[in-house]
Amino acid sequence: MKYLTVIKDTLKDQIALASQLLLLVLAAYVFTMAEEHRRWKTPVLFIGLLSWFFLRHRIKHPIIWITLFVLLAVDLYFKYFWVANHHFMLIFMVLSVLIYSYHKRTDILLKNIQILLVIVVLTSVVQKLMSTQFMSGDFYYYMSNRGVLFRNFINFFPEKLEIIKSNSKNLFDLHATDPNIGEHIVLKNILPNLGLISVVFAWVTVVMELVVAIALLFKPRSVWTHLFFAAMILGILCTRFETGFMALLAICGLYLCRNLYLQLLYVLIVIGCFILILTKLGFH
Amino acid sequence: MNNTTKEFVLKYGIPTLAVIVIAVHLFLVNTKNLSKWKGGGYGMYTELHYFGNQIYIPGMSLDSLLKDNQEMKKTLSCLMVMPNIDNLNKAGQLILKTTQKDSIHVQIWKPIVNSKNGHYSRVLIDEVYLKTTGF
């Protein structure tokens, strides 16, 4: 019982907990990207670490957050068109926490996180609605037949893996030919009626994301909002191990949620994603 | 700055930055053919990945061009993620310079798929024919 009380007390201080988890995920992300642009990152890390060891009790600036933010900014500057979309989201979240350490206003931090989250999910919905390839089901159809979606479940069905392998080989052979000839291949379906399933799945994705975005905008603390949001995160993780992005969404959920059980669920998602990122089973 | 303005900027400044990044992304998607997967517009998983795009140079292997050539890798990566005529010209000029050929024909293709009949094929996005201009 004593441990349960300690867990409850930790969860109650959600801002501190969410910020610690953000720092954890951020450190893992920065570590995986550390090799690129080493010439710039080495002095930043050197100055950051030295300042933290010697000056952290003397100055009030959040040295670690500033250092990690600069490292993110270096990657953004040199690889603007190549970094993942959650790199941008991570930058905005870190910036929010960084500024929070100066103004100390919880309501402002939570508003930053809430609006940022709504923008990200809503933009994702708009992008999907604007894409004919997505709304026609063509995108999910291709991804399913290539074994990119639900891979962890497909591994239990060797006959499906054979179809995926055959599709990959046909695609490889096609790409080796001159595209001017105008050749095409016919993808083999891993499921019957996959075309129809793909259209339904595309619409379910859009509706789910739209419901979550609207709920987060108008009822950011509601239990129902977070039930939908957590279900969406888990659903995406089942579809594909987009652990880096999902960890950030779960951290946003943790900032906004007031229900202890759902907070615990968010913490479990973040820790799970963090481990998958570290072990390279998931994407960073 | 008074307190109300300061509070407004603190609350909505960062989300506004996010909106600006998205607007830039959408502008580049529509004017420079940037892949929806990149550029901070949260359009990943809405279209086939740009890795599926194919640079085709008749009579030449890409692997031989890319071998130990960082500038070529960067230029061709740019063309893959943003397949437009400017990047195609840049890539063509670099290939012309590197291979020291008299002329070059460079094409960029993208994949299309039809879920109704399972057809997967490629369509031409753009192409350039370049000749050396030196005497």
Image: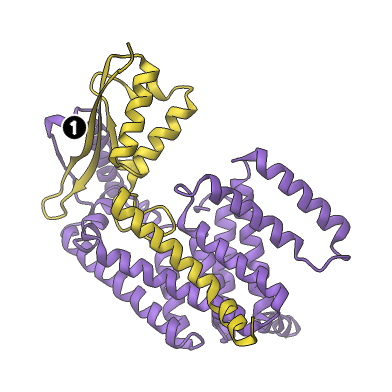
Point out the image quarter for the C terminus of chain B.
top left
State the image coordinates of residue A127 (x, y, percent, origin top left). 31, 64
Q: Is residue A253 visible?
A: no
Residue at mark 1? A179
State the image coordinates of residue A216 (x, y, percent, origin top left). 44, 81
Residue that lies at the very extreme toward the top in this rendered image = B135
Residue A195 placement, left or right of A52: left
Q: From the viewer's perspective, is residue B127 above or below residue A260?
A: above
State the image coordinates of residue B109 (x, y, percent, origin top left). 24, 38
Residue shown at the point (47%, 24%) measured from the top left = B69
Residue shown at the point (31%, 42%) measured from the top left = B83
Nearest the eye: B115 or B89 = B89
Q: From the viewer's perspective, is residue B134 above or below residue B118?
A: above
For label 1, count other residues whose C-alpha is less than 10 Å away and answer few (under 14), some (14-19) or many (20+).
many
Q: Colour of chain B?
A: yellow
Residue shown at the point (51%, 78%) measured from the top left = A114
State the image coordinates of residue A92 (x, y, percent, origin top left). 55, 65
Q: Colour of chain A?
A: purple
Nearest the eye: B108 or A164 = B108
Q: From the viewer's perspective, is residue A103 above or below residue A240?
A: below
Instruction: Tell me the subunit letter for badge 1.
Output: A
SS at mark 1 in the image: helix
Q: Quadrant of residue A225?
A: bottom left
What type is the residue that disc 1 sits on? Pro
Nearest the eye: A252 or B91 = B91
